[in-house]
Amino acid sequence: MDGPLWTETHAPTLEELPQAEVRDAVGRAVDEPMNLVCYGPQGAGKTAAVRALAREAHDDTDNDLVELNVDDFFSRTKTEVKNDPRFASFLVGRSRMSKRDMIHHVLKESAAYAPVSGSYKTLLLDNAETIREDFQQALRRVMERHHRTTQFVIATRQPSKLIPPLRSRCFSVPVRAPTHDEVVSVLRTVVEREDVEHDDDGLEYVAGYANGDLRRAILAAQTTAETADAVTMNAAYEALGDVGLTGTVEEMLADAEAGEFSAARNTLDTLLVDEGYSGQEILSDVLRVARSRHSGAELARLHRLAGEVDLDLAEGASDRIHLAHLLAELGRSA
């Protein structure tokens, strides 16, 4: 996409969150700061709700909202964590640390510094279903130590993965998948603000295409608008076909099978984060592409790997971790 992502430029305020129960629950945490566990399916709006809370609660959101995506820690190597510009300042002179100690140090330092604009800051731990138990125990201790100046918010698809001491220290905020009508309403607001030509059929098509994933719906509307200067049924059908996904997946598989794992994983990140595809969609297209590239024992091997990944995705674990594992396995025979 050429311009800023619409998911960022049209991030909802607290009042604009489509689910009344989420507005009420998160709104209470503005007046009375409390730790939260926001849980629900991918694309339901958990992160958007936390950012809306932070904008309402803090005068300097850029400094007083700290976002730590758990995938950025546990799905990366020690070198990648150390060189990430978001964490580099915390890890200067600490190259001898283990990856585990690096993660603990970044968490403690992020929670420890004083808020800039008020009496507390908000620390969001996103994709928390991948947090190991030892890290959860460390997080519990950090929460106890810094509860006066830091509001902790845990966002996850699987709250059952959290240890009881963590859950007991947080108020639960369920975030269900948005209804079709809620997605259409959000899309209408966004395209009207962008002054993009649209019709009801186009918005309905994009909402159906997203299948309950609000982030994906907004990105799909942006893709359609950039491709056809309008969000109509015909424009959306042409812009959101499988050709673009399949072509990118072909490149990703070619890199993986050639042993170019970093390039393949960068493409995977683009599909998951920038384009908004779900892990299941990418896996389905991987199999579609594989059937045109392989046969016999190699195709059977790939199907076995895909079956394992499909089970992991269904359990709600990190899409990035498990699809990256699939790519790494494909490169073993390179």
Image (cartoon, rainbow, N blue to C red):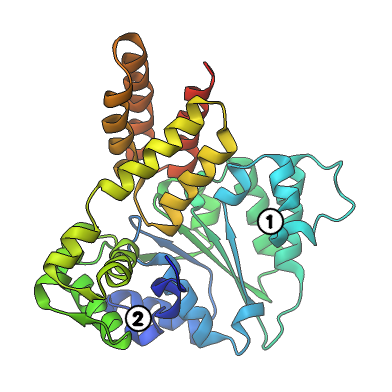
- At which x and y percent is residue 289? 30, 31
Vertical comparison of 157 with 312: above or below: below
Q: In the rendered structure, which amino acid carries the disc numbered 2?
A: Asp
Q: Which residue is mark 1?
A: 141
Vertical comparison of 292 with 242: above or below: above
Name the foreground residue: 47 vs 276. 276
- At which x and y percent is residue 277? 34, 52
Position of the C terminus by quadrant? top right
Vertical comparison of 123 with 72: above or below: below
Q: In the rendered structure, which amino acid carries the disc numbered 1?
A: Arg
* Element assignment for label 2: helix
- At 29% from the left edge and 14% from the top edge, which residue is drawn? 295
Mark yes or no: residue 211 visible. Answer: no
Q: Which residue is mark 2?
A: 24
Crowd tier of the residue under label 1, counting other residues whose Cα lies within 10 Å: few below 14, some 14–19, many 20 or above = some
Q: Kindly give the residue lying farthest to the left in the view shown.
A: 201
Position of the N terminus by quadrant? bottom left
Q: Are marks 1 and 2 in contact (CB under 8 Å)?
A: no
Name the foreground residue: 161 vs 201. 201
